[in-house]
Image: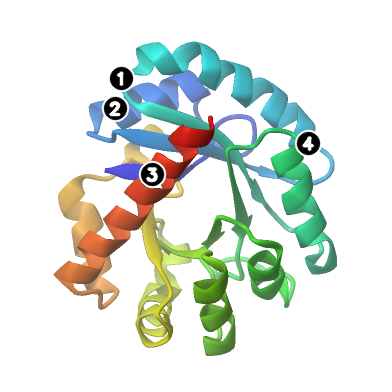
Amino acid sequence: MIDLHVHTYFSDGKNSPAVAMRYAKAAGYRAIAFTDHVDASNMRHVLENLLPMVRAYGPYAGIDLFAGVELTHVPAALVPDAIREARAMGAHIVSVHGQTLADIVEEGTNLAAIEGGADILCHPGLITEQEAVLAAERGVLLEITTRPGHALANGHVAVTARRCGTKLVINNDAHHSSDFVSRDKRKAIALGAGMTPDEIRQAEENSRALVVRLLRNV
């Protein structure tokens, strides 16, 4: 299993990166990405702390570690620039907090994330078919989430992705050690969203493919 959406106490997570790493490994995950919530006020601070930790602990962790960001409540017009800025600061993975039904997110954020070339559009809520088609063209992955609240639109995301040929990943949006759900729970949530077993396997393969690409570049 792979979780490319993990929060620590550098944003609203409960644990240090090291604790999150330990619990993820114990739960059977073989790769995780720390993607704390950032905007212009804290992006550099978060990456300057996460990147050295990942470099130092990675060889001893027993799982692959990556340091990234989840751009959150950044004005939609500024999202593409923020994606480029995060990459310039060394972020391994850049995600964007999508227009989830569980939060008040600026209209246009989903489209801006896709146009800006984010790696993952997290919990994109009622994403449109036009946006999903563009995500497929641009190689932006859409997230099926195990996190309550954000998962309200999982079914819509799954159906829209199937219709538009958009690639999916399954993430936990982990904030606490207990959020690293089991393989069976991940599968059950994906099935509940209307995904087929083959689509679940493909989503897991999409995560693996991204990890392989990241390992080449780290």
- Per the image, the residue denoted by label 1 is 62
The image position of residue 162, as x and y in percent, is 35, 81
Residue 116's quadrant in the figure?
bottom right
Tell me which numbered mark, 4 or 3, is placed earlier along the sequence.
3
Q: Residues within 10 Å of mark 3 (few under 14, many from 20)?
A: many
Taking 213 as reference, is 155 above or below it? below
Taking 130 as reference, is 116 above or below it? above
Q: Residue at x 73, y 77 (%)?
A: 107
Quote the CA–CA distance across marks 4 and 1: 29 Å
Q: Residues within 10 Å of mark 4 (few under 14, many from 20)?
A: some
The answer to whether mark 2 and mark 4 are in CB contact below 8 A is no
Tell me which numbered mark, 2 or 3, is placed earlier along the sequence.
3
Quote the CA–CA distance across marks 2 and 4: 28 Å
Taking 55 as reference, is 65 above or below it? below
Quote the CA–CA distance across marks 1 and 3: 15 Å
Q: Residue at x 15, y 52 (%)?
A: 184
Tell me which numbered mark, 1 or 3, is placed earlier along the sequence.
3
Asked which secondary structure carries label 2, the reply is helix
Tell me which numbered mark, 2 or 4, is placed earlier along the sequence.
2
- In the image, 188: left or right of 94? left
Asked which secondary structure carries label 1, the reply is loop
- Per the image, the residue denoted by label 3 is 3
Tell me which numbered mark, 1 or 2, is placed earlier along the sequence.
2
**Type of amino acid under label 4:** Asn
Give me the disc on residue 25: 2
